[in-house]
């Protein structure tokens, strides 16, 4: 009769059984290749892994290219062949175990960057690296999977000495910080449908930097200068302020009725702050607040633009009917979490400043400068009519229309001139508009009803009916 084993004896016996099975199993082709390269059994060497957000793929590729091209370093690049590999989260363990993988072509994916540049990035690839001191390592790059919860970008480094693997990863991170493809560009953020280990998958899109001249921003005297002082001028003296121990983080809130030029002012600031990374956050990207703030810190000097902030930052007693309070609290935490020397501007806009949470709108360090953009006064309306008549043959006395458009917004005046240009084109007069074209445009806009007028920034009851004696047109 066989004597029963104690739990301890069973554990030792089972461990020996597993070791025997492992030692008798044939190593995978990749395991043999890696062992020959490293000069040691690849199944026993230390492996360090680091994950990156999917949008960092092009930055990682540039950093990897520079790392591999450094003096005295040589490498061999291998690809993987296997069924459904794009649907699996592959790792070094899979290479060593076999997992129906064999050597094959390197997978690449094209990533579109600023200015139409297209960068080919490794999706799955193994790099056998030898440096000038004959230190050997293996770098495995696994891009984000197409399906499933694992959506991160991963790099794994194997070396016989853990310190060598740590040094290689540190060099890669340093290269990424220096070669970041997003620094100095205008970007919008959105969140993808796939959630990875670090939350929703963030997608970055490049945009052309706006080209807006100062004279194209028509605001009452002194308003634009106040905004420039807290953004453009502040940025010009950032080094001196930092040297004197002054905080560089700041917040600006632009508020006012629809159509008064808040978005145009944002575009103008983007055009002036050409060396500053701009991160645009709105609508479906609200779940990317954490990502955008992390990027803002990393890519500083930077500016975070959050339009229609009232959608996520209503006064706390009203949050039950609006966005979940977590968005507001996250926004407050991100603005508070910036270091004093972080050169980051938070530029917020809203049509309803009265709805904003006071802790956001009335506290220095979050919003340091609230600026109201009002409906244009008489002088501003005159300038707006002249501005939006550029390119047209409009020999019109604008004075009566300056009076007539009282209570309307710049957006309304812009649409008024566009409608007038359309009428001239329909009459086959090209860009030659007459007072009757402008009067007809007024009538057309009024026909849209109160909703259309509100959307264009016309205040009900303020706009006067078109005059019958508005002259000033001089025929050629």
Image (spheres, rainbow, N blue to C red):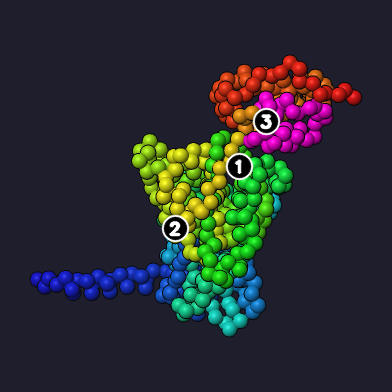
Residue situated furthest right in the rendering: 476
Residue situated furthest left in the rendering: 1
In the image, residue 336 above or below residue 262: below
Q: Is residue 158 left or right of residue 77?
A: left
* Residue assigned mark 2: 336
Q: Residue 88 lies in what quarter of the image?
A: bottom left
Element type at mark 1: helix
Q: Are marks 3 and 2 in contact (CB under 8 Å)?
A: no
Q: Is residue 392 magenta?
A: yes
Does residue 458 show up?
yes
* Residue assigned mark 3: 413
Packing grade of label 2 (10 A; few <14, some 14-19, many >=20) is: few
- Residue sitting nearer the eye, 226 or 434: 226
How many labels, in total?
Answer: 3
- Residue sitting nearer the eye, 399 or 327: 399
Pinpoint residue 386: horizontal percent, then vertical percent.
75, 34
- Residue sitting nearer the eye, 284 or 387: 387
Mark 1 or mark 2: whose residue is earlier in sequence: 1
- Which segment did they paint magenta? 376-405
Nearer the observer: mark 3 or 1; the answer is 3
Element type at mark 2: helix
* Residue assigned mark 1: 263
- Residue at the (11%, 73%) spot, across then down: 3
Mark 3 or mark 2: whose residue is earlier in sequence: 2
Mark 3 or mark 1: whose residue is earlier in sequence: 1
CA distance separating discs 1 and 2: 25 Å
Nearer the observer: mark 3 or 2; the answer is 3
Pinpoint residue 433: horizontal percent, then vertical percent.
79, 25
- Residue at the (63%, 52%) spot, across then down: 228
Q: Residue 474 lies in what quarter of the image?
A: top right
């Amino acid at each position: 009769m066989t004597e029963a084993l104690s739990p301890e004896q069973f554990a030792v016996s089972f461990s020996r059984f597993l070791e025997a099975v492992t030692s008798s199993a044939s190593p995978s082709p990749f395991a043999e290749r890696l062992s020959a390269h490293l000069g040691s059994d690849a199944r026993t060497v230390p492996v360090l892994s680091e994950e990156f957000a999917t949008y960092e793929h092009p930055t990682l590729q540039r950093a990897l290219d520079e790392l591999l091209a450094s003096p005295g370093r040589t490498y061999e690049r291998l690809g993987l062949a296997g069924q459904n590999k794009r649907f699996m989260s592959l790792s070094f363990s899979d290479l060593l175990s076999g997992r129906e993988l064999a050597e094959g072509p390197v997978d690449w994916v094209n990533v579109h960057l600023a200015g139409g540049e297209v960068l080919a990035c490794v999706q799955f690839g193994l790099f056998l690296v030898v440096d000038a001191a004959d230190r050997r390592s293996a770098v495995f790059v696994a891009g984000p999977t197409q399906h499933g919860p694992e959506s991160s970008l991963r790099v794994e480094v194997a070396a016989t000495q853990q310190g060598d693997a740590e040094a290689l990863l540190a060099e890669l991170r340093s290269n990424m910080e220096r070669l970041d493809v997003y620094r100095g560009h205008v970007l919008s953020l959105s969140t993808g449908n796939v959630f990875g280990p670090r939350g929703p998958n963030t997608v970055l899109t490049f945009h052309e930097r706006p080209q807006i001249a100062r004279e194209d921003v028509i605001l009452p005297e002194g308003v634009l200068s106040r905004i420039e002082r807290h953004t453009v001028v502040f940025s010009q003296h950032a080094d001196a302020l930092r040297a004197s121990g002054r905080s560089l983080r700041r917040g600006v809130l632009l508020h006012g009725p629809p159509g008064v030029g808040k978005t145009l002012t944002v575009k103008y600031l983007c055009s002036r702050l050409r060396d500053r990374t701009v991160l645009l956050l709105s609508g479906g990207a609200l779940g990317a607040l954490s990502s955008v703030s992390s990027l803002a810190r990393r890519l500083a000097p930077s500016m975070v633009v959050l339009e229609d902030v009232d959608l996520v930052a209503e006064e706390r007693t009203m949050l039950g009917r609006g966005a979940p309070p977590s968005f507001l609290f996250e926004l407050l935490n991100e603005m508070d979490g910036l270091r004093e020397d972080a050169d980051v501007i938070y530029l917020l806009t809203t049509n309803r400043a009265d709805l904003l949470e006071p802790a956001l709108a009335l506290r220095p360090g979050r919003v340091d400068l609230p600026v109201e953009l009002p409906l244009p006064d008489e002088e501003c309306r005159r300038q707006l009519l002249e501005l939006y008549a550029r390119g047209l043959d409009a020999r019109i006395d604008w004075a009566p229309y300056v009076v007539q458009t009282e209570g309307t917004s710049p957006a309304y005046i812009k649409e008024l001139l566009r409608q007038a240009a359309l009428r001239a084109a329909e009459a086959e007069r090209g860009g030659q508009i007459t007072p009757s074209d402008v009067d007809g445009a007024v009538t057309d806009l009024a026909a849209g009803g109160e909703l259309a007028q509100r959307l264009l920034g016309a205040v009900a009851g303020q706009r006067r009916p078109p005059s019958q004696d508005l002259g000033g047109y001089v025929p050629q």
